[in-house]
Amino acid sequence: MTNYPVRMARWSAGHPWRAIAGWFLFVVLCLGAGITVGGNAATSADFGVGEAGRGEAIAREGGLAQRPVERVLIEGRTSGRLDRATGTAVADEITGRMRGLPEVRSVAEPVWSKDGRAVRVDVTMKGAELDGKKHVDPLRAQTAAAQKAHPELRVEETGGPSISQGVDKLRGSDLSRTEMIALPITLLTLLLVFRSVAMATVPLLLALSAIVASIGLSMLASHVFPDAGVGTNIILLIGLAVGVDYTLFYLKREREERARSGGELSSRALVEIAAATSGRAVVLSGLAVAVSSATLYLADDVIFSSIATAAILVTLVAVVSSLTVLPALLVKIGARAERRAARRGPRKARPHRPVRHNALLRLTARRPGAVLIVAVLAMVALAAPLLGLKLTDMGRETHSRQTQSMPTFDRLNAAFPEVKAAHQILVRADAGRADEVAGALRSLAEDVKDDPGLNGTFTLRGSSDRRVTSLELPVPHYVSTKPAQESLERLRGEYLPDTVGELSGNIDAAVTGDVARYADYPAHQKEKLPLIIGALLLVTFAMTVWAFRSVVLGLVGVALNLLSAAASLGVLTLTFQGSWAEGLLDFQSTGTIGSRVPLFLFVILFGLSMDYQVFVISRIKEAAQRGVPTRQAVLDGVGSSAGVVTSAAFVMVTVFASFVSLHFIEMKQIGFSLAVAVLLDAFVIRVLILPALMLLLGERSWWPSRGPLRAGKSTTERPLANVG
């Protein structure tokens, strides 16, 4: 691990143009291969979890799976009743237009609202439910033509395909806006750090090239781990953050050594020193992020598999860029600097100066025990709201009203509450028992006729081979509401066992549908959460022990990461479950946190926290290996890394905070929680709590090693011996 980054840097520095051309070729090949092969989008079957997923599998087996449905809403421009003859004529026109489209499977008879103010036409599309958004444009064009022909009416279309297409469009524009925010701020930060346009541009270019290569690789990987539609988001979110950070660690060290040598060392020698120190830290950090992200595969969920794949790819590609092409770029930039220095004349090497400590670090040095207690108590206080955390899936009704078709969605649901959601009961049995099963389901439909969570109507269907029977029950409530959830509980706990459950023999029954999906997904995440967190703690501990040969530091790393994640989740809960920050952050509180957010935060934060932990402790270890007493090594290591950690944290916070501007509540929560987590990790954990702990532990920090000199040889002596 110590020599490998140095060998790569040495080759790259010795063959800069080959390394630069090789990296450019690598990026082009990755993107080209991805575009050529194409991505593999997740299907409905990939998303199923819990009983709802089992029910969907039964439905697919019988050809009774939910299909993409669009609904055309016809209303008057005023709030009065719609003329019956006019409404019927326009509905018939819509029916004729839609039936002539190859994308349409069937068109239902027009349905009037109870108050007579609206009529709707339900259009069922061909293909799978998730594919509807790809083929909905011809339907929307016909609706627009009907609207143009009847300007006195409001003729609009909504439905799952239209809204899904709108979500994709709005997400794309949102991501473009976040790039416009994050990139200039990141560049400005790097300019302030390096005071050089060339040095500031390098991290940004490498991060962007790593993102491009990772997008291509993710298309290839999607044929093993299907893409749930979030891969590109994660690549942008993580790629810009770690790509800039890894390059920043490397560049900062090269600049420090250049200033310290006063021109006595060549660019190649400086690159090797940076590779042996910061380069090693980058490799360890990247591996930590990748391995931590891999624990998401344990969630057994296509969305988290997509997240894990994207995070692993972009992190490893960023590491490769910092170890291969970055040394070449540094040598070329350094050669220019050396020519300018030669024209100015020789400079003296800068003598070693004591590391300057900021006020917080000086306070920690004087009162480590008091600082530790106060800082930990403050973090625990921030984590306290976590006790009231409520997790739910984010239903369609939580989408921003700027999303295509959402205003029509609201008007449709107001006029026709029965289309808000539905239960679907699937029963699989021998074909000879189809009539018996249908009778039991009719009994169930009779039992729920007066249920307050349902509307009393039902649809009974059977598969062509008579082995699968489906009962659909409309739910006039949004999936997130208490009446909808309670109706699901009664259906699964009372009505189904009392009817279908009484049938003897081999009967397979399940309840799925909109409400069941909404309920089962968070339940699935809660079930998997202990397993993933346990694996995450083990991975973090093992990586830290492997990196520093210290069990104590491994335990410290696990504890601090847990503290950081809990505090950031507490702040997230306080902010998004309440309504006080709605105007500030432009959201409408659902009173809950997205079910994916905590798991995503834990995993990604544990990986990113290793960036700072590895970098800071590596600096401490270097100082101790030079013979500096442990106490002073802690202060010097933290002090010397404070500037680069602060700069790196600022870049990460900028990237993550830019996602708060997105229109989708779950992405807002993810961006906000990660930004808060990085702030707390960089400015409380690494500047106050970690040094305070290590100061109190002293030499015991390195147990079972007797000290850093026993833990491993100096990483700075080896490259210096090679470059003389």
Image (spheres, rainbow, N blue to C red):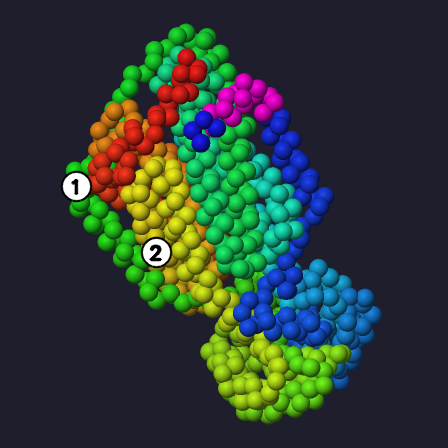
**Residue 100 in the image: above or below residue 500:** above
Residue 269: quarter of image = top left
The residue beneath circle 1 is 367
Mark 2 secondary-structure assignment? helix
Total numbered labels: 2
Q: Which mark is residue 566?
A: 2
Q: Is residue 657 left or right of residue 232?
A: left
* Front-most of residues 42 and 75: 42
Mark 1 secondary-structure assignment? loop
* Front-most of residues 132 and 79: 132
Q: Which mark is residue 550?
A: none
Q: Which residue range is magenta in the image? A: 5-19
Q: Is residue 715 magenta?
A: no
* Front-most of residues 148 and 520: 520
**Residue 141 in the image: above or below residue 77:** above
Amino acid bearing label 1: Arg
Amino acid bearing label 2: Ala
Residue shown at 59% from the left, 42% from the top: 214
Residue shown at 52% from the left, 39% from the top: 316
Split into 4 quadrants, where in the image is the C terminus?
Answer: top left
Secondary structure mostly seen in magenta is helix
Mark 2 crowd level (few <14, some 14–19, many ≥20, 10 Å Cα): many
* Front-most of residues 283 and 572: 283
Split into 4 quadrants, where in the image is the N terminus?
Answer: top left
Give whichever of discs 2 and 1 has the lower sequence position.
1
Residue shown at 69% from the left, 39% from the top: 32
